[in-house]
Image (cartoon, rainbow, N blue to C red):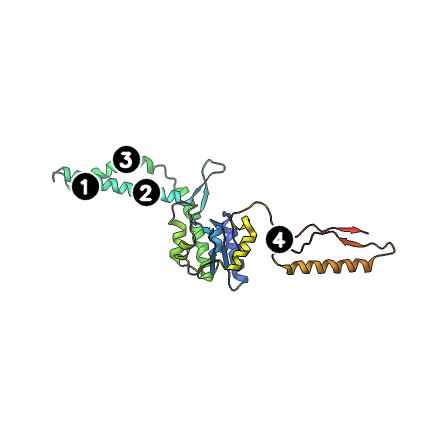
Amino acid sequence: MILVTNGGDPDAAYRIARCVQNHYEKFTVCVSGICKSAGTLLLLGAQELAFSDHGEIGPLDIQLAKKDELWGQESGLTVMTALSALHENAQDAFDHFLMSLTARSGGRITVRTASEIAAKLTEALYSRISGQIDPIHMGEVNRSMAIAKEYGKRLMGKSKNFEDETLQALISSFPSHGFVIDREEADGRFKNVRSCTVDELALLDDLDSFALSPSASTWMRFISDDILEEDLSNARAQDTTILEQSGVDGTVATAAGDLQANGRVGNASVGAG
């Protein structure tokens, strides 16, 4: 599977990966260009990853709609990171106040009294910030972040191409949703990672820009002559059938299509002769 995507619905990505796992003994994903977000989730179902020089995957942090914004999105890690930073800063502030009071008092203030004063100072400094935390929103974020984890664990059962540490790293260890994970880094996190073969590179070269970045346009083309020859054979058989069934008027079906030898597909029409 050549996979080029900015991401999308994680449920759909999981269903696609599950479907391919159930119908093929070996599943290889060719990462030829951008393969982010839900695309990374999908390739967790593959037993093997093949990277081109332009290939890159990304983290699995879930994207959530921003409050009171129509189109804006934010990473589910934003809330968790903010909470972690608040905890660390509050702890550092408490330690600083406690040590400072103890040292400067010259032993005249007991540790218990100093800790009570440090706690009150820390509370005064961070209470307004912590008061803005919405517990309902926190619960929503936690549930959303669990989607990638649970889907990843299920796909890992058949792909066996990564461990729990890799899954957890993809979910929470990268600083941004667009962070680039190239072939070298993927090789250190997945069990079966290789470069594209000569034949695969030839195919990617033929696909041109479609193998590098997602496109809104549809592109269809035969990549071998087998289907072309079959279509030409079916067209000749159809012409013969129509000629045999024609009446006195001698109606003849002519192929006005553009079935060229290079495999490109044009529009076929039927006319009367």
Label whose residue precedes the other's in the sequence (1 or 3): 1
**Is label 2 in a helix, a strand or a loop?**
helix
Q: Are marks 1 and 3 in contact (CB under 8 Å)?
A: no
**Is label 3 in a helix, a strand or a loop?**
helix
Compared with residue 182, is residue 134 higher up or lower down, i.e. above or below?
above
To which residue does mark 1 refer?
A: 99
To which residue does mark 4 refer?
A: 221
**Is label 4 in a helix, a strand or a loop?**
loop
Left/right placement of residue 50 relative to residue 108 reads: right
Query: Which amino acid is tagged 2?
Result: Ala
Label whose residue precedes the other's in the sequence (2 or 3): 2
To which residue does mark 3 refer?
A: 125
The foreground one among 272 and 6 is: 272
Measure the C-alpha gap from mark 3 to mark 4. 64 Å
Q: Are marks 2 and 4 in contact (CB under 8 Å)?
A: no
Query: Which amino acid is tagged 3?
Result: Leu
**Is label 1 in a helix, a strand or a loop?**
helix
The local crowd at label 4, few if under 14, some if 14 to 19, many if 20 or more residues have their Cα within 10 Å, is few
Which numbered disc, 2 or 4, marks the residue closer to the eye? 4
Q: How many marks?
A: 4
Query: Which amino acid is tagged 1?
Result: Met
Label whose residue precedes the other's in the sequence (1 or 2): 2
Q: Who's the residue at 83% across and 57% down the image?
A: 246
Residue 262 in the image: state x and y as whole percent.
64, 55
Label whose residue precedes the other's in the sequence (2 or 4): 2
Measure the C-alpha gap from mark 2 to mark 4. 52 Å
Residue 172 in the image: state x and y as whole percent.
38, 49
Which numbered disc, 2 or 3, marks the residue closer to the eye? 2
Measure the C-alpha gap from mark 1 to mark 2. 21 Å
To which residue does mark 2 refer?
A: 85
